[in-house]
Amino acid sequence: MSDLILKRYENGLVVLSLNAPPYNMLTVDLRAELITSLDCAEADPDVSAIVLWAEGRMFSSGGDIEEYAKGMQSPTVLDLCTRIEGCRKPVVAALHGSALGAGFEVALAAHGRIATAECLLRLPEIKLGLLPVAGATQRLPRLCGSEFALRMLLQGNAVRAGDAQKRGIIERLSQSDLWDEAQEMALDLAKQDRFAQTRDKVAGQGDPAGYQAAIEVARGQAKGPLVKLRHSICQLVEAAQILPFETGIEMEAAAFEAVRTSRTFLGLKHIFFAEKRINAALHKGADLNSLGVYGGGPQSIMIVRDALLANMSVSVVNFDKDSLGQLVRSVHDAARLRLWTEEKVAQAMTRLNLAGTAQALAETDLIIDATRASGKDLAERYSVSEGEQIKPLVVFNAARDADRLEALTGRKGSVATMLTAPYGIFEILPCSRPNPSSVQTLQRFSHRLGRLGIVAEAPLRKPMMQAQTRAALWALKHGASPAQIDKALKDFGYRTGVFERLDQEGLDMIQANLNRKTPDPFWLELVDVMCATGRLGAKTKLGFYSYDETSRPSDTDEALTQTLAGLRKKHHFEAQTISRGEIQLRDVAALLSAGCGLLELDVAPHASVLDVVAVASMGFPRWRGGPMRSAQAHGLIAMQKALRKFENNDAAIWHPNAVLAQALKTADGFDNLDL
């Protein structure tokens, strides 16, 4: 036997400790060893009670997601929970850090639970398109009722142990020493003639009508791509009240088997692990407590706001009165969404320092320059002497050459360009020979601000956005309306359609950035006409859509319909019927083509990174796993045929390149593609 379970005998009981830190994942080997240890403890006449403990920073992160996908090996987590609950000696789970998923289910199967006040309890399976594997849908509502159980099961968010105690999920909160108090609780249970199993508890079912009413409310609120799963969870919680425990467990197992091979789970699993790989080196980066920002503007305001809300101290230089006003409003708006008090907002603003010169930023942990200053000016601001401690320097201007700035400033290996998106990601483009610690620090900074730090050789989001826009414009030129195109994309799962996004960006901003040397004549003329007639987008309540007082878009109006018809005729585009399915297929094909192009140029480290970019910053449906994964799920042979067909329409948008051909040669497609 290995040492996955540590045994400590004290005071007539045994403490069985999960010993696979930092996460104490419930692998098949750990499960088997824990069951064996329970058998030994139950048979030992000198042991009157059992405490379940865990080494490291948390109780358990739960089961192995890859094992879920392949099928659980024996003994399963359900087998383990059944063994714990059926033990003839009381078992108390002592929880600290967090108990997630199957780890929380193990605690639910125990005869008693005690936790530190800051311990987090969570059933995150819904986030992966799954449901619990070991009885949580049956045990949890028996303890706390259907409303709170459904909140945990359907939202997948963490609950603090203090809240769980109020709901009857946790019997006791540790007041000082969890180790001693857990043993005391276990010995108290051992003195009782009979201790209750969770399956037999009914505290959460004292109001049958209210229990059922909460289920009906949850059913009515279920929507989106996971609606069937949500209804299934509601049915299981309902079964916990009206059917025998064993029947509910069998139903839960059958429901789990039905979803573990679904395309939804496989897509969510793919993006989960892709994000995990991106964040793998976060622990190596330096911790950041202060930020220096030179220059105002929308990007700076967003960064400063998020840094203040993340408890960082921020020094700003060259922030004019208008930028400061926008920053204050932005902080208050964001804080309101987080339900912050005015006092907490005021505390955040005290961390803002209005500095006078760039030299004042030298003491901060990270410097961001958001200006369009010349290389000479940047060298004067940020040059360092030999032997001086070097802090990472970031510039927002994508046209900047990080290698040249590195040479000008003397910041060897510590200069990068960072591109921001409205949400989700920061793109980190380091110099050609970066200091790994600087890159990891920038990733850690991104994480602290709630973003994913994507490290690449060149921008990834922009070419993918351009490909999507061009595919939508092709459909627009050939007879589809903006509303028809956007509806098809939102039906596919996007949060926002292409033309809604263009309205949010502003047609005047798009006009200012149009390439007039090699333009698309149709698009160039359409943008010019729309700007000339005041159709600037959401900010003027009129663009591709008209907007009401709530900024909600309505259908395209007749004037724009006539404009589009005239431009199609002028540029010799024949209107045709384009189905919803064709719009969706052309969109995925365009993103696939752009993604393969980036992989061919070797600027993206892996296809899964492109999936993360699309999901996190473009609103691509998460449950589909990203465009590369979605194309693979559709079938790469079928996608290659579609690209060859669409290539006749516009080879700049749809082109089946060599990377796709290479992916077709392997059973795993893009998953293990060696470029």
Image (cartoon, grey):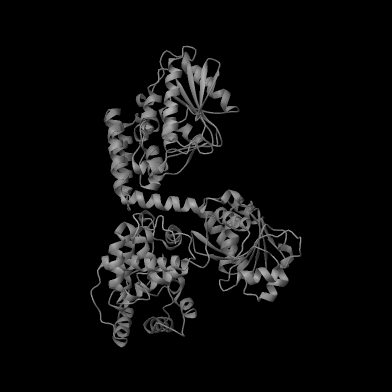
Query: On the picture, is 30 further left or further right than 284?
Result: left
* Residue 388: x %, y % from top left: 75, 60
Vertical position of residue 63 compared to residue 345: above or below: above
Evaluate whether residue 233 shows in this view: yes
Q: In the figure, 507 relative to 282: above or below?
A: below
Percent across and percent down for residue 647 are 31, 74
Q: State the image coordinates of residue 641 (x, y, percent, origin top left).
A: 28, 67
Instruction: Give the quadrant of residue 354.
Output: bottom right
What is the total number of numbered labels drawn onto the structure image?
0
Above or below, 510 against 41 in this view is below
Residue 518 location, x and y as percent? 44, 84
* Left-right relation of 586 to 116: left
* Left or right of 418 on screen, residue 602: left
Q: Quadrant of residue 8?
A: top right
The residue closer to the viewer here, 83 or 475, is 83
Of the pair 145 and 130, the residue shown nearer to us: 130
The residue under the point 30% across, 73% down is 646
- The residue most toward the left is 577
Question: Which residue is pictured at 63% across the width and 59% down the height?
Answer: 435
Quadrant showing the C terminus? bottom left
Q: Is residue 168 at least partly visible in the picture?
A: no
